Amino acid sequence: MSGAARPGPLQDSSRAKIWLSHYWPYLLVAVIGTCGAFVQISSQFSPWDDEGYLVSSVSEFLRGGSLYDQIYTQYGPF
Amino acid sequence: MASTGTALAVYIVVTGLLTPGHKAFHRYHSDPGLELPGASMVRLIRPQAETLQSTVKAIRDQHCQMLLTVPGMNSFNLWSGVRPPTNENLTHWFIVLDAKRQQRIVDAIRGKRGVCILRNDAIIKFWIGTSKDNVVDNRPLWRYLQTLRVRDVFGANRGTYGTYRLQIPDPMGKAPE
């Protein structure tokens, strides 16, 4: 049995406050960046359709196709 | 000193992130959603959305059983629910797929009923412009498509990126230009 005390609720909340006071600018940028990325991604359709190719590859893989042998992909270790 | 730093940080966040973000968010909400399977959260300017939607409708109306896209535009397979001839799918397949892989696609479509071809010459030109090699003409599927007689059953060009032409093989039709 370890004698180390587990942090209580108060300690947890203090830690969260300290963490937030240090890292809030990063959190703010991450939230704004995520919203911006969502809008950017969802507001365009690239005619060369890389998305379609990749989603189609994943879809065929999920249907049971095996990579490289049955599903062509440019990307991979070999 | 600290207050100057904070003011600068606030200025950067407001001018660099919030203002353009607000404009983009406003535009996102004013554009119509793409009424296609799996793409309802995608919002495009109306002419482009209508071009894509009408193209998908044309594919469905033709009751295509296979859809070959030239170049590879597999979103149309996903949106229309019509599968490509094989799993050899790629955007610039005519440059990257070797003769063996292209031959598999030829074998899958030659003489088959219900084959539809969706073609966009502007995007083909774009891809060929990116290629350093000039091997496209010698490969089986590309060669096959040059000689295949087809009939245009649909054309949509209300966007910036050329015309989507839906074609079906037709012995009385003409070979693509």
Image (spheres, helix red, strand yellow):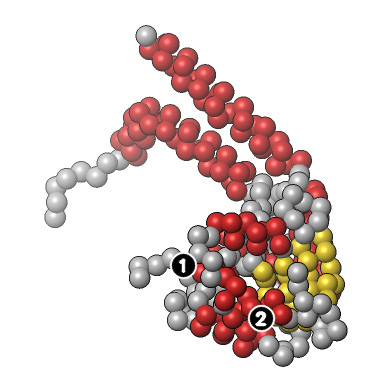
Chain of the residue that carries numbered disc 2 in the rendered image: B
Task: Depth check: give the residue in front, B55 or B135.
Answer: B135
Q: Residue at x 71, y 36 (%)?
A: B26
Q: Which residue is drawn at 72% across and 90% down?
A: B111
Which disc number belongs to residue B144?
A: 2
- SS at mark 1 in the image: loop
Q: Where is residue B24 in the image (x, y as percent from the top left)?
A: 66, 36
Q: Where is residue B148 in the image (x, y as percent from the top left)?
A: 73, 81
Which disc number belongs to residue B167?
A: none
Query: Spatial distance from mark 2 to mark 1, Cα to Cα?
Result: 23 Å
Kindly give the residue lying farthest to the bottom in the view shown: B111
Q: Nearer the viewer, mark 2 or mark 1?
A: 2
Q: Position of residue A9 (x, y in %)?
A: 34, 39
Question: Which amino acid type is marked by label 2?
Answer: Tyr
- SS at mark 2 in the image: helix
Chain of the residue that carries numbered disc 1 in the rendered image: A
Q: Where is residue B164 in the image (x, y as percent from the top left)?
A: 76, 62
Task: Depth check: give the residue in front, B168 or B177.
Answer: B177
Label 1 sits on residue: A74
Does mark 1 fall on the same chain as mark 2?
no
Q: Quadrant of the N terminus of chain A?
A: bottom left
Q: In which quarter of the image is the C terminus of chain A?
A: bottom left
**Residue B59 in view here:** no
- Label 1 neighbourhood size at 10 Å, few (<14), some (14-19), many (20+)? few
- Location of residue B171 by image quarter: bottom right
